[in-house]
Image: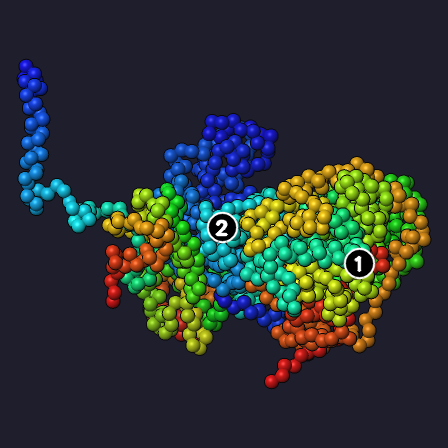
């Protein structure tokens, strides 16, 4: 019976419209629903998986030892590492060439998990679209640059 | 066969088999670390612990042999615990630096710990400091990673027979290293220790930190250095050859390699490689397109054919090319050009041995296997430093000798293999023929010959007896320095052999009368009955990897494909039918004849593939001059050689790593090679170049790929075999006394009073031809040549180690560094042939063999004095 | 251990040594087996086993020199480094330690003015520690050259060293 009245009097629809109306008059800053992207940005949670970067040690040298585990683990095969021995120190291994093809990257974060020396890290950067694809195929220097900003190392 | 139970599964295994192997056969994996199928049981790591019923405690499966009714359990909580504990022991000192370690990804310890270990170590004491040594040119030693399985020490001793590595100190202080723990290995650098190390304790410097095993592409192929034809795999990444790996028990080498094979690969990616065709404009070589280069060649060839006839063009090909390349080249020369003027590197000496063998064995395909060598009961090794020239063949000899075979070594110097020999005969240089004749004489006169053979070939043996009668043992001793007793002992041992093997090398084939000496050795085989029966062999060693193939494919004026006689109309007919075009009948010129032809103006154009006469012939020789006189010289090579500088057109060829094809090793075994990388630069496989040229010459030889050529070769050579007359021994033994007498002529060479030393140029272990000089590995071990000289000679001349010596003769003088070694007899000098500078080759003169026209230029008489540096 | 320069000359067994070796050769199945006595003779004659001595033994027995090196460094009774006239070997194994081997060792170090593993300037004494010498009942103990000195006390050590000088 109640159901019948509800149906013919459009009660449900009115209730819905009332909710909309309530939100329509809600003031900014109180209980904000719409974020005016790109002028405003949503705060990101910790552990957000954004753009990858390479970190440095506290003495400013690269952390990456070129072990190639990130490349091996990467499910989308977007990482390329060519390792080499340092010329002045035959025992030192480093990545001669390091490149992440962001166009292929799925931001799964496996590479960060795999990295045994915590050289790879994920930043909270996410606006990566570019007019030219080549600019988001990132080589080592660029990744280090991002790392320097997002994970600053202590300069003594 | 015995029956045993492993994990409730009934397994049948041969008696005396190791438990690990039996389990593996049954598909049950027992983890091992120190065990390796190639090595003797050791039982050092104790990871293979299993429970065997009725035996106390857990037993090591890698040292226990199977027996009837054995009941074995390989998986149980008890065993898992034991394994975990053993792995923890192994890891007590092992650093966890897998991300940096070069072995990461293919480390046996890593795999085992992943599978069975705990990944946690309780040991918290200070860690010992171990040697970390990177001073060796090729092998890095990081002993903190060593797990003391002693596989490297054992492979060095048991398989390679070098025993250079040892474990020194004891207990947890044990380290691995050469004598006195020195940082330089100073050994044969076979690299077996690096290959067999289960962890990253011994690593190759050349591969260090270059790539992970999962990043590389693996291509099975055949080594391009010597005639052994070892099988290995190239690991490549993005067009770079990164390293060479082998599989245990694969190929003739059974997983072993020599230093050239293991470390000599980097010439492929050498920056000096030719990458584009070059043509001479004015006096400079300028890069051009393939189309233009081939156009020029075809035009000039056509013009020369028009003006001087096809026989004014000649071609020489190297023994490093594939069978397909060589086959197509001789087809190109014979049909597209129309001449038989083709020769190959085999003319430097190998042709002597093969001509002799063909003379005796006939057109039947000659096959002698290295397995025969390994299984022989008597080995006669004549005039070869086998462990240096053909190291893997040397390994087989070592293996046979270690097994108990009688090894008789005869060479002009004290060789490495001699330490395994029961008789080490050091004969005087140039007296090889006396020695061989002495053996024949001893066999006949002492009645060691095969009685059955005597019945069959009575006349032949009687003839020989008549001939060798004239030679007394006294004369032999005088000439060779070997006593009658020794010669008789050697002859007796060889003739009594059931599986007698003769190995002979450059000292016979690359010397004057090489053809006759080879025939003499074959006589020795015939009369002792060691020629046809199973397990016997006569094996000429060959220097370049496909010299056999070069002759078999017909890159010689006297041979058509399949060793058919180019002079016989009947044989020509066989191949003409398949080729559908007549083969020119006119007799072709051999290499020395080609160069003489150039001097006389008969030959106008020369097409050289992979050879470098300007860099190998002595500079004062006529042949060297001949190169300058050519109207038109085409050079096809990997590297810009001295000959390329003289050339009008230079074509870049692809190396063995960039093409498909087959190589035939010295056993006569054809083996497939596969392209591992794309051709470097704009280079092309040789056969494609011939194919392109033939099109422009108006006789298109079009093939889809190397396989198509192989199919045609199979057709041609099968055609020859079916028509071959089989064994020709019956014919050969009918040789008249007069001819035999000619075969048994001996010529003595006397050192002129002014130049008392005999200088020999020859191959050494670390290099092969000129190619290895472009590879980083061999160059690191041996960057320059050293003149080997006897200590007494050196004393007399006042030369000490490290000095420079001045070699002088009528052809000029050269300064060389000296290495004093008591391996050289007095009066004899040795210098490696591989180095362009100093140009010791210029002291030599070219000798030409009367029988096979082989040209020798590897010896000279010189005077030596100490070089006093100017200050 | 870096000394790979071998001085071949100047190493030769004395006649007696050679004779003993030849005599023994008859009793041993192979020259490998003769390695231990040969090294012992070499040590007696050359003082200690340096690279030249090892090379010489290898040449005499026709055994690979690396094998000789491995054997010589495995056994503690072969000396691969030059030692003083008296080799003082102090046991630091369990029984001796419990009864004050550490103290004995310290005392010796002070007395001789050297550390473990070193040789005095006058080349008279070399001090090393060793594992159990099987004289636990009379611990602490030390061995000087081939003689055992047991139940050590400070005074005892003074007396022993005095006697050796």
* Residue B732, disc: none
Residue B623 drawn above or below residue B176? below
Q: Nearer the viewer, residue B91 or A82?
A: A82
Q: Are marks 2 and 1 in contact (CB under 8 Å)?
A: no
CA separation in Å, label 2 and label 1 = 50 Å
Q: Can residue A139 be seen in this view?
A: yes
Q: Residues within 10 Å of mark 2 (few under 14, many from 20)?
A: some
Chain where mark 1 sits: B
Residue at label 1?
B307
Q: Nearer the viewer, residue B197 or A150?
A: A150
Rendered location of residue B250, percent (x, y): 60, 43
Q: Which of B363 and B18 is in front in this view?
A: B363
Q: Nearer the viewer, residue B745 or B398?
A: B745
* Residue B237, disc: 2
As drawn, the residue found furthest toward the top would be: A1
> Which mark is nearer the camera, 2 or 1?
1
Q: What's the residue at 41%, 52% (across, down)?
A: A81
Residue A57 drawn above or below residue A76? below
Residue B750 drawn above or below residue B735? below
Chain-order first, disc 2 or disc 1:
2
Q: What's the residue at 8%, 25% (across, down)?
A: A12
Chain where mark 2 sits: B
């Amino acid at each position: 019976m109640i159901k019948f009245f509800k149906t013919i009097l459009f009660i449900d629809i009115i209730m819905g419209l009332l909710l909309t109306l309530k939100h329509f008059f809600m003031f900014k800053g109180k209980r904000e629903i719409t974020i005016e992207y790109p002028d405003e940005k949503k705060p990101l949670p910790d552990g957000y998986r954004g753009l990858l970067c390479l970190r440095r040690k506290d003495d400013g040298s690269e952390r990456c030892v070129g072990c190639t585990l990130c490349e091996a683990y990467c499910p989308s095969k977007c990482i390329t590492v060519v390792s080499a021995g340092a010329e002045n120190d035959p025992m030192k291994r480093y990545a001669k060439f390091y490149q992440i093809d962001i166009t292929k990257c799925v931001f799964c974060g496996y590479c960060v998990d795999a990295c045994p020396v915590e050289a790879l890290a994920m930043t909270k950067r996410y606006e990566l679209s570019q007019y030219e694809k080549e600019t988001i195929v990132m080589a080592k220097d660029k990744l280090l640059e991002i790392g320097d900003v997002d994970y600053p190392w202590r300069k003594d | 066969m015995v029956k045993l139970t492993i994990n409730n599964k009934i397994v049948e295994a041969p008696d005396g088999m190791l438990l690990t192997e039996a389990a593996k056969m049954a598909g049950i994996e027992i983890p091992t670390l120190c065990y390796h199928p190639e090595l003797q049981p050791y039982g050092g790591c104790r990871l293979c612990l299993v429970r065997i019923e009725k035996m106390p405690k857990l037993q090591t499966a890698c040292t226990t042999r199977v027996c009837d009714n054995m009941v074995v359990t390989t998986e149980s909580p008890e065993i898992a615990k034991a394994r975990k504990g053993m792995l923890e022991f192994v890891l007590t000192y092992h650093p966890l630096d897998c991300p940096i370690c070069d072995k990461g990804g293919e480390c046996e310890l890593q795999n085992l710990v992943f599978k069975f270990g705990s990944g946690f170590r309780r040991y918290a004491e200070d860690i010992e400091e171990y040697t970390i040594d990177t001073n060796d040119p090729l092998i890095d030693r990081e002993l903190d990673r060593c797990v003391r399985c002693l596989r490297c020490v054992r492979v060095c001793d048991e398989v390679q027979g070098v025993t250079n590595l040892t474990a020194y100190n004891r207990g947890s202080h044990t380290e691995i290293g050469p004598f006195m723990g020195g940082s330089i290995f100073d050994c044969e650098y076979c690299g077996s220790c690096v290959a067999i190390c289960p962890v990253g304790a011994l690593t190759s410097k050349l591969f260090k930190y270059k790539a992970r095993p999962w990043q590389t592409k693996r291509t099975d192929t055949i080594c391009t250095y010597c005639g052994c034809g070892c099988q290995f795999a190239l690991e490549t990444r993005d067009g770079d050859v990164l390293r060479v790996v082998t599989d245990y028990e694969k190929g003739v080498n059974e997983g072993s390699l020599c230093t050239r094979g293991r470390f000599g690969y980097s010439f492929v990616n050498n920056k000096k490689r030719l990458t584009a065709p070059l043509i001479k404009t004015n006096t400079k070589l300028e890069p051009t397109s393939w189309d233009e280069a081939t156009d020029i060649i075809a035009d000039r060839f056509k013009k020369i054919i028009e003006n001087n006839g096809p026989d004014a063009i000649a071609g020489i090909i190297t023994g490093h090319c594939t069978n397909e390349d060589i086959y197509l080249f001789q087809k190109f020369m014979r049909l597209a050009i129309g001449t038989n003027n083709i020769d190959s590197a085999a003319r430097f000496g190998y042709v002597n041995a093969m001509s002799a063998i063909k003379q005796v064995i006939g057109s039947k395909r000659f096959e002698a296997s290295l397995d025969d060598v390994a299984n022989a009961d008597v080995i006669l090794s004549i005039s070869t430093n086998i462990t240096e020239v053909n190291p893997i063949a040397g390994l087989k000899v070592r293996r046979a000798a270690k097994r108990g075979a009688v090894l008789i070594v005869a060479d002009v110097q004290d060789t490495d293999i001699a330490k395994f020999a029961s008789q080490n005969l050091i004969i005087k240089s140039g007296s090889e023929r006396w020695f061989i004749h002495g053996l024949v004489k001893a066999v006949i006169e002492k009645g060691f010959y095969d009685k059955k053979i005597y019945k069959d070939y009575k006349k032949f043996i009687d003839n020989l007896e008549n001939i060798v009668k004239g030679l007394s043992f006294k004369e032999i001793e005088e000439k060779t320095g070997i006593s009658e007793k020794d010669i008789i002992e050697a002859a007796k041992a060889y003739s009594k052999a059931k599986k007698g093997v003769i190995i002979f090398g450059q000292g016979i084939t690359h010397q004057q009368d090489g053809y006759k000496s080879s025939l003499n050795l074959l006589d020795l085989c015939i009369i002792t009955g060691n020629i046809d029966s199973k397990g016997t062999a006569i094996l000429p060693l060959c220097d370049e990897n496909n010299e056999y193939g070069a002759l078999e494919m017909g890159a010689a004026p006297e041979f058509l494909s399949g060793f058919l006689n180019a002079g016989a109309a009947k044989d020509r007919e066989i191949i003409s039918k398949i080729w559908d075009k007549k083969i020119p009948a006119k007799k072709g010129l051999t290499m020395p004849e080609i160069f003489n032809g150039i001097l006389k103006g008969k030959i106008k154009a020369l097409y050289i593939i992979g050879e470098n006469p300007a860099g190998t012939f002595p500079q004062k020789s006529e042949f060297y001059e001949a190169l300058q006189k050519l109207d038109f010289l085409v050079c096809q090579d990997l590297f810009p050689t001295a000959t390329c500088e003289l050339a009008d057109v230079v074509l870049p060829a692809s190396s063995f790593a960039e093409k498909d094809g087959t190589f035939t090793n010295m056993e006569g075994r054809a083996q497939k090679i596969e392209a591992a990388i794309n051709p470097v630069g704009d280079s092309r496989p040789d056969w494609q170049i011939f194919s392109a040229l033939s099109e422009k010459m108006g006789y298109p030889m079009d093939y889809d790929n190397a396989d198509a050529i192989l199919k045609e070769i199979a057709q041609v050579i099968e055609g020859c075999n079916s028509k071959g007359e089989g064994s020709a021994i019956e014919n050969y033994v009918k040789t008249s006394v007069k001819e035999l007498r000619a075969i048994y002529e001996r010529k003595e060479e006397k050192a002129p009073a002014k130049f008392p030393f005999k200088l020999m140029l020859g191959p050494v272990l670390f290099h092969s031809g000129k190619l290895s000089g472009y590879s980083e590995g061999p160059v690191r071990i041996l960057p320059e040549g050293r003149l080997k000289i006897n200590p007494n000679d050196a004393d007399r001349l006042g030369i000490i180690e490290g000095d420079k010596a001045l070699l002088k003769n009528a052809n000029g003088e050269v300064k060389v560094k000296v290495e004093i070694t008591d391996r050289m007899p007095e009066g004899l000098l040795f210098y490696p042939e591989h180095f362009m500078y100093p140009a010791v080759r210029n002291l030599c003169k070219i000798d030409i063999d009367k029988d096979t026209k082989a040209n020798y230029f590897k010896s000279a008489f010189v005077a030596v004095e100490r070089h006093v540096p100017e200050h | 251990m870096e000394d790979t320069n071998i001085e071949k000359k100047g190493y030769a067994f004395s006649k007696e040594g050679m004779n003993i070796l030849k005599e023994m050769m008859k009793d041993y199945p192979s020259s490998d087996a003769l390695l231990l006595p040969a090294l012992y003779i070499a040590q007696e004659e050359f003082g200690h086993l340096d690279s030249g001595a090892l090379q010489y033994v290898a040449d005499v027995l026709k055994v690979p020199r690396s094998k000789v090196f491995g054997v010589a460094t495995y056994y503690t009774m072969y000396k691969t480094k030059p030692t003083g006239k008296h080799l003082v070997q102090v046991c630091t194994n369990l029984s001796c330690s419990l009864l004050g081997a550490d103290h004995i060792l310290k005392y010796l170090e002070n007395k001789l003015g050297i550390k473990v593993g070193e040789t005095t300037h006058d080349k008279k004494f070399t001090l090393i520690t060793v594992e159990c010498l099987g004289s636990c009942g009379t611990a602490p103990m030390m061995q000087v050259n081939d003689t055992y000195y047991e139940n050590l006390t400070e005074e005892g050590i003074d007396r022993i060293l005095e006697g050796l000088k």
